């Protein structure tokens, strides 16, 4: 088996069908198949082979897909690097993975410290013209030395346009994606050919992908949601990916109207943002499906969206460590506030601190088993054993399960706030605050307290045109929730710090609070 086989099949069946639309250009399935074949030949000619790691340090550009499927054809392992990372972070991931080559842009090449990455042999710039031969301006390592760069155009020039994918075993590595690193250095999550193949097939089935669909892809391809649930599942289905460098509302909405996008994939913060703007200038009638994942959707936001547009936002749940799709709300019955039930082939359970299943309705750690669960963490056997103990992937998420198997996320274990021995789950307080009509976005987090251990803090963004004070937030909380959950600190801010995937970065808020 080989993930590149699905691209080869689609190119043979529908060569002229658009695979990717990007900034006015169209890349057909034949184009993508031939370009990835040419690059596979170029890689092989430079001694790159099966199981070698190939780093992709790119924003959302078509070359991401070209490099990804070229590596798959060879049996090499794509290593995804967050495009907002800088030298120290890139150095860590390149050395941890042992990548032999990195594909990047001229702008980002300056953050590749080749002199500190002994395994790295090639720095290939995807937007450098053929014949340039020079290091892009500013492309220096953190040590100040020039970073030798090669041009992708030169690599693929005159290469054959057909390359049969090598045969891979089901358990062979197919991708290396790094965890967020919120609790330490990022860990490389090793996903196998079978992990990815089974998970994208399930994603396409549950979301109902069709060959005539056009999928909005502004979520980063270096993240498992964009890479597997959107890109890979779309290619499997023969659909079209409408690719954006990032989420810029007017650009995306204009494309929905012009390109007739049918499927819209986001994270909660994007749906929150769209609920706050006037969408009447745009013709969004082509959209038939919306989905949110990567963070828990506040129930109030989901209800507002359904009331405004008459469609539910489907929700998925999973982790990078399970490829990521494990839970879906829902093919049969949607329940607000839930992430749904386990998808086919998966089991979910709720465990206590002794790894014993708790009664339905009680909260504990969500554990997962199924065909998408990772092979393990790259070169970290102890971390792998800890995460996969007892045959279950331990998610680190706290939740509960009702009698029908619907899962409700309570919060992350690490985000729990301990106020004088009382547990406060930030998501619970956030759910109440989203009911305030003046609130646009909110984040609840814990800060140290010398006597109580921790206390509750809130950062809140008011809706446009609305005024909101800290006293109003505190008064509202006192009326609605227990005293120990009421925030001791409220900051009214213009925006919240977010990751490239749109997740609110509570660790940044905690750091900022500690500096005040």
Image (tube, helix red, strand yellow):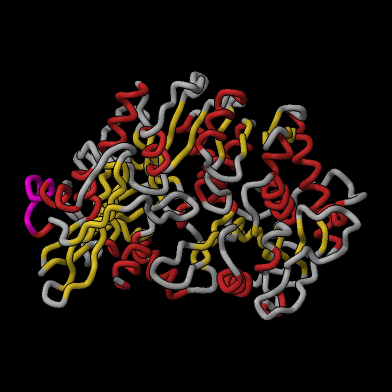
Residue 211 in picture, x, y percent from top left: 61, 26
Nearest to the observer: residue 23 or residue 162:
23
Q: Please tell me which residue is depicted at 80% across the width and 66% down the height of the picture.
A: 135
Q: Please tell me which residue is depicted at 61% across the width and 56% down the height of the picture.
A: 174
* Residue 479 in magenta stretch: yes
Report the side of 138 relative to 460 (left or right).
right
The C terminus lies in quadrant? bottom left
Query: For the image shown, how many numbered marks are present on the structure?
Result: 0
Q: Do we see residue 198 in this rendering?
A: no
Q: Is residue 404 above or below residue 2?
A: above
Residue 488 in picture, x, y percent from top left: 15, 61
Report the side of 508 relative to 281 (left or right).
left
**Magenta residue span:** 476-483
Q: Is residue 115 above or below residue 302?
A: below
Residue 371 in picture, x, y percent from top left: 47, 50
Q: Do we see residue 270 in this rendering?
A: yes
- Locate residue 261: give its quadrant: top right
Predominant secondary structure, magenta span: helix
* Residue 383 in magenta stretch: no
Nearest to the observer: residue 210 or residue 351:
210
Q: Please tell me which residue is depicted at 48% across the width and 22% down the height of the picture.
A: 281
């Amino acid at each position: 088996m080989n993930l590149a086989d699905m691209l080869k099949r689609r190119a043979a069946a529908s060569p002229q069908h658009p695979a990717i639309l990007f900034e006015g250009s169209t890349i057909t399935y034949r184009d993508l198949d031939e370009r990835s074949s040419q690059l596979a030949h170029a890689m092989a000619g430079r001694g790159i082979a099966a199981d070698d790691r190939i780093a992709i340090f790119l924003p959302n550009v078509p070359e991401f897909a070209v490099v990804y499927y070229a590596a798959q054809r060879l049996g090499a392992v794509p290593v995804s690097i967050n495009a907002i990372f800088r030298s120290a972070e890139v150095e860590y991931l390149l050395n941890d993975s042992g990548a032999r080559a990195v594909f990047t842009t001229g702008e980002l090449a300056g953050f590749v410290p080749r002199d500190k990455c002994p395994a790295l042999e090639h720095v290939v710039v995807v937007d450098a013209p053929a014949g340039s031969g020079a290091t892009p301006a500013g492309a220096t390592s953190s040590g100040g030395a020039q970073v030798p760069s090669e041009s992708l155009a030169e690599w693929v020039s005159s290469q054959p346009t057909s390359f049969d994918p090598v045969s891979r075993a089901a358990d062979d590595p197919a991708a290396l994606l790094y965890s967020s690193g919120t609790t330490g250095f990022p860990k490389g999550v090793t996903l196998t050919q079978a992990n990815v193949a089974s998970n994208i097939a399930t994603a396409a089935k549950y979301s109902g992908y069709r060959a005539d669909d056009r999928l909005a892809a502004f979520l980063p391809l270096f993240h498992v949601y964009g890479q597997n649930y959107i890109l890979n599942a779309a290619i499997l289905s023969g659909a079209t990916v409408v690719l954006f460098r990032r989420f810029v509302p007017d650009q995306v909405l204009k494309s929905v109207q012009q390109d007739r996008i049918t499927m819209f994939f986001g994270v909660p913060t994007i749906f929150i943002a769209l609920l706050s703007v006037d969408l009447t200038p745009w013709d969004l009638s082509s959209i038939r499906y919306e989905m949110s994942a990567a963070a828990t959707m506040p129930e109030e936001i989901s209800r507002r969206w359904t009331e405004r547009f008459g469609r539910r936002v489907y929700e998925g749940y999973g982790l990078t460590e399970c490829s990521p799709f494990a839970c879906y709300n829902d093919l049969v019955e949607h329940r607000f506030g839930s992430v749904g039930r386990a998808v086919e082939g998966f089991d979910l359970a709720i465990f206590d601190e002794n790894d014993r299943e708790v009664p339905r309705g009680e909260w504990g750690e969500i554990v997962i088993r199924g065909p998408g669960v990772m092979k393990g963490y790259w070169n970290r056997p102890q971390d792998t054993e800890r995460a996969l103990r007892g045959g279950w992937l331990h998610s680190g998420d706290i939740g509960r399960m009702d009698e029908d198997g619907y899962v409700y996320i309570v919060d992350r274990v690490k985000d729990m706030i301990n106020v004088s021995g009382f547990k406060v789950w930030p998501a619970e307080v956030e759910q109440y605050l989203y009911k305030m009509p003046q609130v646009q976005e909110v984040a609840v987090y814990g800060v140290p307290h010398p006597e109580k251990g921790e206390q509750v803090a809130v950062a809140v963004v008011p809706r446009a045109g609305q005024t909101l004070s800290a006293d109003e937030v505190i008064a509202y909380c006192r009326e609605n929730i227990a005293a120990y959950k009421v925030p001791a600190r409220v900051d009214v801010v213009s925006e919240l710090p977010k990751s490239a995937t749109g997740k609110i970065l509570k660790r940044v808020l905690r750091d900022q609070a500690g500096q005040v």
